[in-house]
Every structure is written in structure tokens, then in C-alpha cells.
């Protein structure tokens, strides 16, 4: 799993880094934290009765955060909200279903 998530996290970090200014440390730390969350979603998913729900919820939450980061640090655009809000709410809904 880390073989897939590691490059995604490194790619996100390299993509965001030039746009972060003095916020590099907290934002890059957040990339690590949210990547660990996705890893946890996938790790617990394969041992439960609803394997795809936790993994999908965590992945959608990750994508929503990338849309927020793009909006905040890279380029403001309606597309960021059009992608970010649905993926956030659907991701949260799926994660809530795992309780």
C-alpha cells in the first residue's frame, strides 16, 4: 500500500511546495498526516466486512483536500469547489458508514 501512497504523497508535496511560501512545514506535515489516514483506511478496510467503504471514503477525503490545497495555494477556480465539496461529503459519508 505504501508503494502506491508514497509516490502520491511525494507528488502532492512537490506540486504544492513552490506555492506554499512560509507555510511549507505545516502543509507538508499535513500531506503526511492525510496520507497516513488513507493508509489506515485501506489497512482497516481489508480486515472488515465492508472493505471498499473505508478505503473509498479515505481516498475521497484525500482528493477533497487536494482540491482545497489547489484552491488555496495554486489556482482559485470553481472547479476546485465543484470537485472538492462532493468528494468531501461523500468521503465523510462513507467513513461514517464504517462505524
Image (cartoon, rainbow, N blue to C red):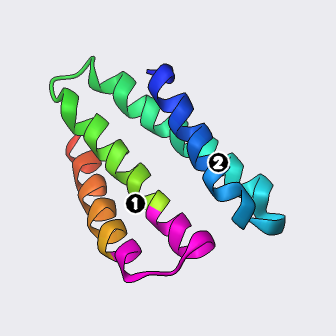
Location of the C terminus (image quadrant): top left
Residue that label 2 marks: 13
x, y (%) of residue 60? 32, 51
Q: Which residues are magenta?
A: 67-81
Residue farthest to the top, as pictured: 47
Secondary structure of the residue carrying tag 1 is helix
User: From the viewer's perspective, is residue 6 above or below residue 68?
Assistant: above
Q: Nearer the viewer, residue 23 or 17?
A: 17
Residue farthest to the left, as pictured: 49
x, y (%) of residue 17? 71, 56
* Residue at (26% x, 49% y) in the render: 96
User: How busy is the neighbourhood of tag 1: few (under 14 within 10 Å), some, or many (20 plus)?
Assistant: many
Compared across the picture, whether 92 is left or right of 9 comes to left
Q: Nearer the viewer, residue 83 or 46?
A: 83
Q: Nearer the viewer, mark 1 or mark 2?
A: 2
User: From the viewer's perspective, is residue 6 above or below residue 56?
Assistant: above
User: From the viewer's perspective, is residue 63 above or below residue 34?
Assistant: below
Amino acid at each position: 500500500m505504501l508503494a502506491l501512497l508514497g509516490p502520491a504523497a511525494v507528488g502532492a508535496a512537490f506540486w504544492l511546495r513552490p506555492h506554499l511560501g512560509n507555510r511549507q512545514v505545516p502543509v507538508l506535515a499535513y500531506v503526511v498526516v492525510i496520507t497516513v489516514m488513507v493508509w489506515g483506511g485501506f489497512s482497516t478496510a481489508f480486515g472488515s466486512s465492508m472493505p471498499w467503504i473505508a478505503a473509498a471514503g479515505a481516498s475521497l477525503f484525500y482528493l477533497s483536500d487536494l482540491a482545497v490545497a489547489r484552491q488555496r495555494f495554486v489556482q482559485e477556480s470553481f472547479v476546485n469547489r465543484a470537485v472538492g465539496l462532493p468528494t468531501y461529503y461523500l468521503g465523510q459519508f462513507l467513513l461514517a458508514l464504517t462505524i
